[in-house]
Image: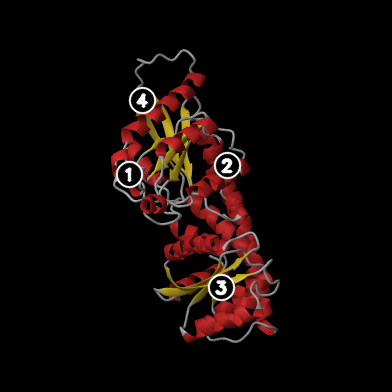
Amino acid sequence: MSKYSRKIQKLHETAPKENTAVLVSIIRQYQTEQETEEHLDELAFLTETLGAKTVYRFTQRMEKPDIKTFVGSGKLEEILSYITHFEVDMVIFDDDLSPSQMRNLENELKVKIYDRSLLILDIFLNRAQTAQAKTQVELARFQYLLPRLTRMWTHLERQRGGTTTRGGSGEKEIETDKRDIRNRITLLKEKLREIEKQGETQRKGRKGIVRVAVVGYTNVGKSTLMNLITKTDILAENKLFATVDSTVRKVVLENVPFLLSDTVGFIRKLPTHLIESFKSTLDEIREADLLVHVVDISHPHFEDHIAVVTQTLNEIKAGDKPVLLVFNKIDLVETMPSEEESMQMTELELEEANYLDFDSLSDAYEKKTGIKPVFMAAASGLNVEGFRQALISEVKKQHRKIYPHYLEDEVVTWTEEEK
């Protein structure tokens, strides 16, 4: 472990168990205050996932961020006054900050500064389990930290009660740390290449069998769905990025074998360098024959989530694959009332009710994609059989492409090695 890695580890070990945080976001010209609040709700969920408690939110309407401190001087004074009075541990921004903005903000506010990328990277770092995921996240984190090393060194010195790092041994140690990080990045890249070679070998051995990848926005229930179909115990929590490792399981439904893989959830403003570092994991999506796109229909902005996932799939060149759309968590939404129920409601009640018309939604997406979506609730088991039938129907279509002479009553068995 490098000297810099030990410093970061020591910082994490000495950090308080419960941290408090304030959130900061600017409202751009094309945004409404409501949209900004919704984005901050997601940031608060990310903050909770990291293990910190959000105590306040700051917003400021600006055409573009201030080049030095992201927010204006008046808003910065307001933030400083609040975090000083209430002894807040960290300030978290809903956008990426430049290295100079990070440094200036920490010098002004004297607390830990997180931007969106660093927050997500730390969550990934805490949740990665496999060697591949750990290597990918560590690489992305070091690449992110390298240009921001001066800021991090200042923070570490303050934790030890030291002074500033200007001049003298501080600068020399920073250069040493930079060299250590560059060496570590080189080693991690080499290690990742070796892991990717092993992954390529494994994927080559999967030829001749249909591959299905479960994709979707984070926290939509992908892992719960995987557990239902594969009868395994993949981690499933009501937290963002509960699963960051790609999990592949062999499944046989109606005598048809296929491989089902769970993948890391997508999210708004997912750091580009993090997407790039997860290249080998995302290969499971790129090389899949079928994508099962899971959507949390109970979320008020599920359509925006669909757009984010679609855009990300296009970015990784997987946007042209067959997709089975699954609207999950239907037990958490209000459906259209029956005619009898409508008769008993006032006009105001009908106008204010937030009902979801499944039939209209189904028709719209079937017309758009050519595939009828599935409505279900994986956690409660509602319409699981409907999902299974839709899944096996789409898998059979892909199976026939591989085996054109496939017979419906063909019995499939696994070899001892495959079992």
Q: Which residue is mark 4?
A: 414
C-alpha gap between disc 4 and disc 3: 53 Å
Callouts 4 and 1 close, C-beta under 8 Å: no
Nearer-N-terminus badge (3/2): 3
Q: Which residue is mark 1?
A: 342
Nearer-N-terminus badge (4/1): 1
C-alpha gap between disc 3 and disc 1: 52 Å
Residue under the point 48% across and 45% down: 216
Callouts 3 and 2 close, C-beta under 8 Å: no
Nearer-N-terminus badge (4/2): 2
C-alpha gap between disc 3 and disc 2: 31 Å
Task: Identify which amino acid the numbered label 4 is placed on.
Answer: Trp
> Residue 113 got which mark?
3
Given residues 354 and 244, the one toward you in this image is 354
* Image position of 350 (left or right of 177): left
* Image position of 236 (left or right of 121): left
Residue 394: x percent and y percent?
45, 27
Residue 110 visible? The answer is: no
* Residue mark closest to the camera, 2 vs 1: 1
Nearer-N-terminus badge (4/3): 3
